Image (cartoon, rainbow, N blue to C red):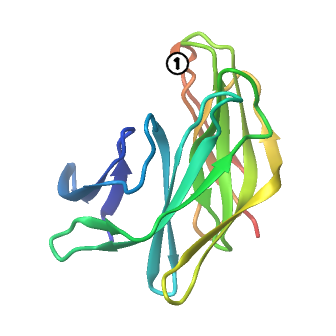
Amino acid sequence: MPGEYLALASRGIVYRLKVTGSTAAVLGYSPLPGIGEGDDFESFALVARGGNLAALWADRGAGAERPATLYAAPLSFAAWGQPQFGAVTRRAYLSAYPTGEGARHISDISVTGSGRIIVSSASDAGDDGPFDSAVSDAGRVTVSAAGQVRITLAAHPAVLGTFPRYKIEAVECLPGSADALLGTDDENLGGYVRAMPFCGA
């Protein structure tokens, strides 16, 4: 709906927000279903197909010993505004770049109009860096006419771009465009926004 947004807190609560002017009101909220112990969320994306909604979110993972977990589920809303999730699908994901102890395998998710899953991955060694990050084509998501959600992850994710010295924690495919907006949080070194052509069919 115009002026409405979903926001995800890192521990797994989804808030439905209505923004009017300079005021944001919470219309409803719900915990994410089926999440794992110790999950830490930095990413959330919506997919709309044929009148059906689906949500994707991911635990970011941590190094080679903890892959990210990508979750997906059908999404609807109760009459009073609360988000409601259907059956949950889970997939483990290891980034092709960066790797190593400080790697967050999924720091954000966006989905293209054709269903490609675009993810950012980042390495964080502390408030002064060094940082490293990449954007990759992780796979595809489909939503059937009955609202069923299917995720297919690539056996070897294609790295679309690498960004040494930066920590990308936001990626958003712009509607009707091949461009992705990338946002960094480089802690004591500041932050940047950049557009890159990562979201074409």
Give the position of the N terminus as an image quadrant. bottom left
| Nearest to the observer: residue 186 or residue 101 | 101
Horizontal side, residue 35 vs residue 84: left or right: right
Give the position of the C terminus as an image quadrant. bottom right
Horizontal side, residue 142 vs residue 154: left or right: left
Residue 127: percent from the left, percent from the top? Answer: 54, 12
- Image quarter for residue 140? bottom right
- Image quarter for residue 184? top right
The residue at 22%/74% (across/down) is 78
- Image quarter for residue 123? top right
| Nearest to the observer: residue 30 or residue 113 | 30
Residue 102 visible in the picture: yes
Horizontal side, residue 138 vs residue 144: left or right: right
Residue 184 vertical position relative to residue 26 in the rendered view, above or below: above
| Nearest to the observer: residue 95 or residue 24 | 95
Horizontal side, residue 132 vs residue 148: left or right: right
The residue at 74%/40% (across/down) is 95
How crowded is the residue under tag 1: few (<14 C-alpha within 10 Å), some, or many (20+)? some
* Label 1 element class: helix
The residue at 81%/48% (across/down) is 160
Residue 158: percent from the left, percent from the top? Answer: 83, 51
For label 1, the residue is 187
Q: Amino acid type of disc 1?
A: Glu
